[in-house]
Amino acid sequence: NAGVTQTPKFQVLKTGQSMTLQCAQDMNHEYMSWYRQDPGMGLRLIHYSVGAGITDQGEVPNGYNVSRSTTEDFPLRLLSAAPSQTSVYFCASSYTNRYEQYFGPGTRLTVT
Amino acid sequence: AQSVTQPDIHITVSEGASLELRCNYSYGATPYLFWYVQSPGQGLQLLLKYFSGDTLVQGIKGFEAEFKRSQSSFNLRKPSVHWSDAAEYFCAVGSNTGNQFYFGTGTSLTVIP
């Protein structure tokens, strides 16, 4: 039982490049979410999904896309990377938004 | 809208001293409440949670928290802090209205010898 996995652990992008952060869970959780963490800002919700085929925006969705084709996977796409997207990104999953969220180890992204 | 407030951005305590981290929430119904810890460079680990019942809940690593409905608070406590407790602590609330899970902005704990 791997829990929540994220790849890559580290990534450096140039401004304007695109990439996908991968997130997978093996706990059959319906609820999955993406957060970014910046110093002094806590965790800010980017996008979330309440089940396969259903996604919605969180607090800071601009510049990011998500899709949820399977229960297990919830990738986060950066369409055209900007320095303001330099951050640590965490994926989380849970049965619903009401219960404890299980977090992946994070992806540290730097955009130059 | 639901919200979670952690009024202390940073706290410094001496090793062996007691600790209390404050958390206030804004929520209409009985909330599901959580405390997470994040060590430097690591992900978030669940310390404890409150759903219902006994308002004093025990967690891992010797932490406990008390739910006080009248004060809309869920403060985290530890009787004697260890140097390894230095970390960032996040309070969070799960909502049954809407679809989001809400985090506070965190409290950074420094432990001095």
Image (cartoon, coloured by chain):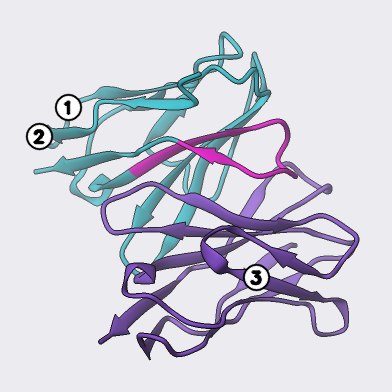
Up/down of B74 relative to B100, above or below:
below
Outermost residue toward the top?
A70
Which of the chains bears the disc numbered 1?
Answer: A
- Going by the numbered disc 3, the residue's amino acid type is Glu
Asked whether residue A98 is drawn in magenta, I would say yes
Image location (x, y in percent) of residue B34: 65, 58
Question: What colour has chain A?
Answer: cyan
State the separation of the CA atoms marked 1 and 3: 45 Å
Residue B64: mark: 3
Q: Residues within 10 Å of mark 3 (few under 14, many from 20)?
A: many
Residue drawn at 64 percent across, 69 percent down:
B4
- Going by the numbered disc 2, the residue's amino acid type is Lys
Q: Are marks 1 and 2 in contact (CB under 8 Å)?
A: yes
Q: Residues within 10 Å of mark 2 (few under 14, many from 20)?
A: few
Q: Determine whether, in the image, residue B38 is placed left or right of residue A30.
A: left
- Going by the numbered disc 1, the residue's amino acid type is Gln
Magenta segment boundaries in residue numbering:
A89-103
Residue drawn at 74 percent across, 65 percent down:
B57
Question: What colour has chain B?
Answer: purple
State the separation of the CA atoms marked 3 and 2: 45 Å
State the separation of the CA atoms marked 1 and 2: 6 Å
Image location (x, y in percent) of residue B47: 57, 57
Q: Identify the residue position indicated by label 1 in the image.
A: A17
